Amino acid sequence: MSSRSEPLAAADPTESPAARDLAIRGYRALGVIAVLVAIVYQLRNGLAREGITTADYLSYFTELSNLIAAGVFLYGMLSRAHPRSRKVELFRGAAVVYMLTTAIVYAVLLSGHIPIYPWVSTVLHRVIPAAVALDWLIDPPQVHLRLRETLVWLAFPILYVAYTLIRGAIVDWYPYFFVNPHRHGGYLLVAADCTAITAGILGLIVATTWVGNWRTG
């Protein structure tokens, strides 16, 4: 009896590498579609009601980080490279940090804002961050990542703040209140807020690096 049951268990398609790979590619494809549908829908229907331009909309960290995540998912869905390169794993880890930053900053600082399209906000601030973080756990990096490498993930948020302040001074528009120097406190308060957020991002970098290495074994 036992000799007959063992081949059946071994033949279970849900445990085969091919089925697992198909499942991973499938949810990555859904993630790409969800991001593009949400962003395009907002671009086509919501900007006039919010009184912002397309350039303004694409200057939100939320939209940029989601587009990065969609690009990472798209590459992971289409690429057949195995094992993945260190560079690819670093890009994947960066997407995790940026999406978790998006989710946490929104939950802590921006959740009182009532979006015009709640489903778009849910997709971009909750669903995709969760999907990207789970992807890091389900399909962990195939190389050991060193912290001195992953600290480069901080470059994009720093460049984003610099871009936002320069562009804001030119067009007099800022995507978030904590990067708006027109508040009482001016640039000093902006610097304090950004320093606090940077500290949080550093914590996410350390945690994401550790979890990736732990899952890699």
Image (cartoon, helix red, strand yellow):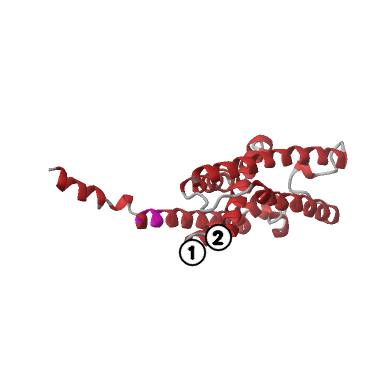
Q: Position of residue 149 (x, y in %)?
A: 66, 51
- What's the residue type where badge 2 is placed? Ser
Q: Position of residue 67 (x, y in %)?
A: 61, 56
Q: Nearer the viewer, residue 160 or 112?
A: 160
Q: How many marks?
A: 2
Q: Nearer the viewer, residue 110 or 201?
A: 201
Q: Residues within 10 Å of mark 2 (few under 14, many from 20)?
A: few
Q: Nearer the viewer, residue 132 or 203?
A: 203
Q: Quadrant of residue 184?
A: top right
Q: How far apart, in angstroms, are the residues tagged by discs 2 and 1?
A: 8 Å
Secondary structure of the residue carrying tag 2 is: loop
Q: Main secondary structure of the magenta part?
A: helix
Image check: 209 left or right of 160?
left
Image check: 86 left or right of 139?
right
The label on residue 90 is none
Tell me which segment is drawn in magenta: 19-23
Q: Position of residue 145 (x, y in %)?
A: 59, 50
Secondary structure of the residue carrying tag 1 is: loop
Q: Is residue 14 visible?
A: yes
- What's the residue type where badge 1 is placed? Ala
Does the magenta portion include 100? no
Q: Position of residue 211 (x, y in %)?
A: 55, 42
Tags 2 and 1 in contact by the CB under 8 Å rule? Answer: yes
Residue at image position (68%, 56%) is 58
Image check: 80 left or right of 57?
left
Residue at image position (58%, 41%) is 210
Q: Which residue is mark 1?
A: 81
Quarter in which the N terminus is drawn: top left
Q: Which residue is mark 2?
A: 85
Q: Quadrant of residue 23?
A: bottom left
Q: Is residue 114 visible?
A: no
